[in-house]
Amino acid sequence: FSNCERREIGEEVYPIDVDPHLAIKLYSGLRADVVDSIAVKLNGEKKIHYAFTKHLAEILVHEARTDIPVCIVRPTIVTGAEREPFPGWIDNFNGPGGLVMGIGKGIVRCCYTNERGTLDVVPIDHVVNLT
């Protein structure tokens, strides 16, 4: 998601028009509503603030690398664990975990989907064990 505006994404850290250090200084101490109002202008091509902050984080990790190997992992949608620490483990109800919980509780009774679409998800333990 950090480079979602690109048609193709390579294994590289892409430049951004905003200095991440300046962005942190700007956002620090601001109320959430103020951040929301200026984020649209600061984000540039990034229509999603989440993607913008992910991209800033990639830049900061890339800049901070020195004598130790660094790996930036860009997983798709992260879901509950397949095996570790136990099957189904998850620490929040964001994304598909929340949807599954809502279905299980009877709160969500139907979902409109694209039958030709692909649900691109990866269990959290797979992501953690990559590194």
Image: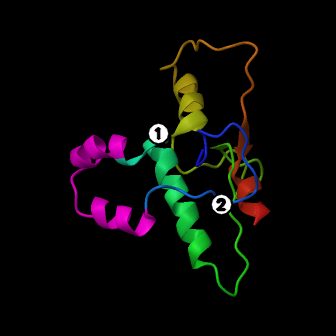
Q: What residue is shown with label 1?
A: 48
Of helix, strand and loop, which one carries label 2? Answer: loop
In the picture as drawn, the residue positioned furthest to the bottom comes out as 67
Above or below for 87 versus 57: above
Q: Quick one: 127 or 30, which is closer to the camera?
A: 30
Q: Quick one: 103 or 74, which is closer to the camera?
A: 74
Placement of the N terminus among the 4 image quadrants: top right
Q: Is residue 74 left or right of residue 58?
A: right
Question: Looking at the magenta stretch, what is its main secondary structure?
Answer: helix
Q: Is residue 50 left or right of residue 32?
A: right
Residue 90 percent coordinates (x, y) = 60, 48
Query: Start and end of the magenta stretch?
Result: 19-41
Q: Dot 2 surroundings within 10 Å: few (below 14), some, or many (20 or more)? A: some
Q: Are marks 1 and 2 in contact (CB under 8 Å)?
A: no
Residue 38 percent coordinates (x, y) = 28, 45
Of helix, strand and loop, which one carries label 1? Answer: loop
User: Quadrant location of residue 12?
Assistant: bottom right
Marked residue nearer the N-terminal end (1 or 2) = 2
At 58% from the left and 14% from the top, the residue drawn is: 111
Q: In the rendered structure, does residue 25 fall within the stretch colored magenta?
A: yes
The tag on residue 13 is 2
Above or below for 58 versus 49: below
Q: Quick one: 19 or 121, which is closer to the camera?
A: 19
